[in-house]
Amino acid sequence: MNIEFIGLQDVNGPLIVLDGVNGAGYDELVRIRCADGERMGKVVRIDGERVVVQVFEGTAGLSLSDTRTVLTGRPLELPLAKSMLGRVFDGLGRPIDGYREIYGECKRPINGRAINPVCRDYPRDYIATGISSIDALATLIKGQKLPIFSGSGLPHNELAVQIARQANTADGNSCIVFAAMGVKNDVADYFRRAFEASGALSRTVMFLNLASDPITERITTPRCALTAAEYLAFDKGMDVLVIMTDMTAYAEALREVSSALGEIPGRKGYPGYLYSDLASLYERAGKIKGRPGSVTQLPILTMPNDDIAHPVPDLTGYITEGQIVLDRSLYAAGVYPPVSVLSSLSRLMKDGIGKAYTRDDHQVLSAQLYASYAQVQEVRSLAGVIGEEDLSAQDKAVLAFGQRFEKEFLCQPEGNTRTIAQTLDLGWELLSTLPRASLDRVDDATLDRYYRG
């Protein structure tokens, strides 16, 4: 039986404190009744008979004497059904698209259930995004977690929409779960219009948390999104791509709540448990042996001052299987998407490409493009010292290759979708502008087949 408590001991930011409480559970759902209606919260600290509750909708207007609090005895749960596809929800999983509530087939706690490591299936099978710089050089694999590291003013929102619109698996049984955290109203409108205009909304579940919404709701948003993704993947057998933006806004909300709780701060003020908290989200990606469906994550985070050593991208890089880094100088040169090839990698790429998945020349072509583009950077540095006029003929060929590689291979405006075959053929066309002897990462048999110099 639920017990109602009248009055509050204290209010501190997004937190309220109750005294004389017995039998409360960590993460337990709490209903707070006040003069302007009902709010929700969860238990975040228990100290004897003192309980601290994090209020999702904020604590503005709560009275210390008249507020009534009910501990429900269960965690926050999300109603789940396949009819969620095509719907838009707020950060707590409540519909905001003007349609009815979801009458779910089931309800599940938003914290999810850990996948038994023994039951995990190794991620394989590539996901085609239609973007050459990703498909060829940092291939996204079904069941992988591959973050995008961006910066303020870079086109990560446009890239997220493009990937969501174009991404597909070999069998076509895929959908998108999109979670936006701390975004402005105009950005939220952009996401909704872009998905509707492209027709991708019908296979997308959207969770939108606005910058004006309470920060505590921001902490809940990715957990609601991942709960929906796990249901669609492991109950309905779909391949789900989860796009979460912006994880830096999520981490800052976590820092603010930690500060209100009086916890000892870690690096740059973030809580010491930031690593394990991020891991509790990222590790919900994967596949389960013997069951159809998969959860693939593409979290997006903005690096403050473009600092890749900042705690959020730094810890994210430890947990995930690679990263796609956006480059400000490429963007300034008019390259879209401005993917920094040499800073990006996909650690699972080698197991999801090749003859069984893409094409037998994919691996060697990728290695040679990396090596040749790295040589471009070296020659550009040399040209900055001695001038282009004094470069050798081979060095000038390398510079010409670099310009074409950026303008023709990397630069791919929205709507210009390439199949994996088109991407690989374009790569060989560019490599064929270099002397055959300089392509030392490719065997002679493969060069005989594809080199056209």
Image (cartoon, rainbow, N blue to C red):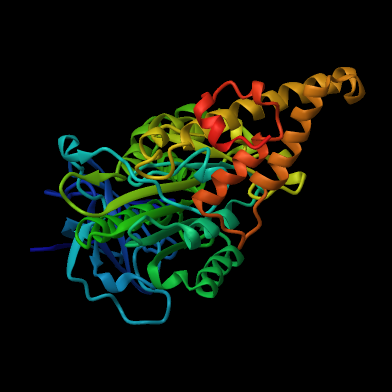
Q: Is residue 398 above or below residue 324?
A: above
Q: Is residue 310 visible?
A: no
Residue 333 shown left or right of residue 175 in the figure: right
Where's residue 386, x and y in %? 89, 17
Image point 72% across, 27% down: which residue?
376
Residue 415 shown left or right of residue 356 in the figure: right
Q: Is residue 442 above or below residue 313?
A: above
Where's residue 136, x and y in %? 52, 41
Total marks shown come to 0
Quadrant of the image containing the C terminus = top right
Image point 34% across, 37% down: which residue?
279
Where's residue 198, x and y in %? 53, 71
Residue 278 shown left or right of residue 304 in the figure: left
Q: Nearer the viewer, residue 55 or 172?
A: 172
Residue that lies at the very extreme toward the bottom in this rendered image: 99
Query: Which of the 4 image quarters holds residue 190?
Result: bottom right
Residue that lies at the very extreme toward the left in this rendered image: 1
Where's residue 396, x and y in %? 81, 27
Residue that lies at the very extreme toward the right in this rendered image: 389
Q: Is residue 283 visible?
A: yes
Q: Nearer the viewer, residue 80 or 323?
A: 323
Quadrant of the image containing the N terminus = bottom left
Q: Nearer the viewer, residue 2 or 285?
A: 285
Q: Nearer the viewer, residue 360 or 126?
A: 360
Image point 45% across, 32% down: which residue?
317
Image point 34% across, 42% down: which residue?
356
Q: Is residue 209 above or below residue 128?
A: below
Query: Which of the 4 image quarters holds residue 99?
Result: bottom left
